[in-house]
Amino acid sequence: MAQIAESGGGDHGKGKGKKRAKKGSTHVDMTPMVDLAFLLLTFFVLTSTFSKPKVMPLAYPAKPKVNDPIPPKANNVTTFILADDKVYYYRGEFYPKSRPGENGPTELSEANFGSGENSVRKLLASWNEYVIKNKAELDKKLDKKQIADSTYENRLNKLTVEREAVKVLIKTDDKALCKSFIDLVDELKIASIGVIAPTELSAGEKELLKAKN
């Protein structure tokens, strides 16, 4: 609180009958202001929402052992192969020439990070249309505060692992560019791909890639 200290008036023995005006000096007590500042600081710290780190989970599959059972067939999987500055892909399981599938042996198709028909973004949008449409509905409910953040995250995570959702394997050769890998992961995030697994090239894929180049 502000206090006013008054200095004594009077003539101090000089000039009898004359009185001088009293002089006051102002002193401000800052203790209540400091208390208020700490209260406000505590209030804003407790009510503020801290930014959450935005990361994309990557699943690294374990290397199979000799006695491991045969894994189940991949469902709705797309494999991207990064070689030098090029991007190749194939859908479904890999079938070499020695063991072709129903549609023959696997063939690589080339994609790019541009905006044409073979762009990675356009291809992913068409393949993962099921997840993208359902995610848009979840986004609307979240914006209208019809569902909580935790409910939104749980439903989205379940959505990206359903049978209709696209799963992606990323494989690289020795000459693949780090920039290409980062660009591909960014495109996968935009397309709401939930299951992403970097893994190694198989011997058959290496031969197919060598023939393609």
Image (cartoon, helix red, strand yellow):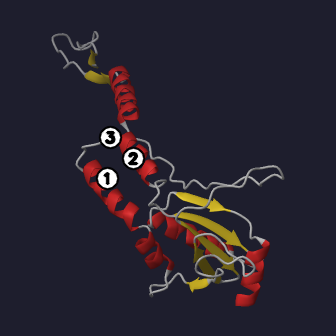
Residue that badge 2 annotates: 155
Work out whether residue 180 or residue 47 is closer to the camera in this orientation and state it.
180
Q: Which mark is residue 148?
A: 3
Image position of 166 (left or right of 80): left
SS state under label 3: loop
Location of residue 7 (image quadrant)? top left
Q: Neighbour class for label 2 at 10 Å: few (<14), some, many (≥20)?
A: few
Identify the image quadrant of residue 208: bottom right
User: Could you tell me if the residues under marks 2 and 3 are in contact, i.e. CB atoms within 8 Å?
Assistant: no
Q: What residue type is labelled 3?
A: Ala
- Measure how far apart labels 1 and 3 are at the Cα level: 11 Å
- Amino acid type, mark 2: Arg
The residue mark sitting in front, 1 or 3, is: 1
State the residue at coordinates (66%, 77%).
Answer: 82
Q: Position of residue 29 (x, y in %)?
A: 34, 21
Q: Earlier in the sequence, mark 2 or mark 1?
A: 1
Mark found first going from the N terminus, 1 or 3: 1
Residue at (49, 53) in percent of width and height = 161
Q: Which amino acid does label 1 sit on?
A: Leu
In the rendered structure, the answer to whether residue 14 lies left or right of residue 131 reads left
Is disc 2 in contact with disc 1, using a CB cutoff of under 8 Å?
A: yes
Circle 3 packing at 10 Å, graded few (<14), some (14-19), many (20+), is few
Whether residue 127 appears in this view of the structure is yes
Looking at the picture, does residue 67 appear above or below residue 125? Answer: above
Q: What element carries label 2?
A: helix
- The quadrant of the rendering that contains the C terminus is bottom right
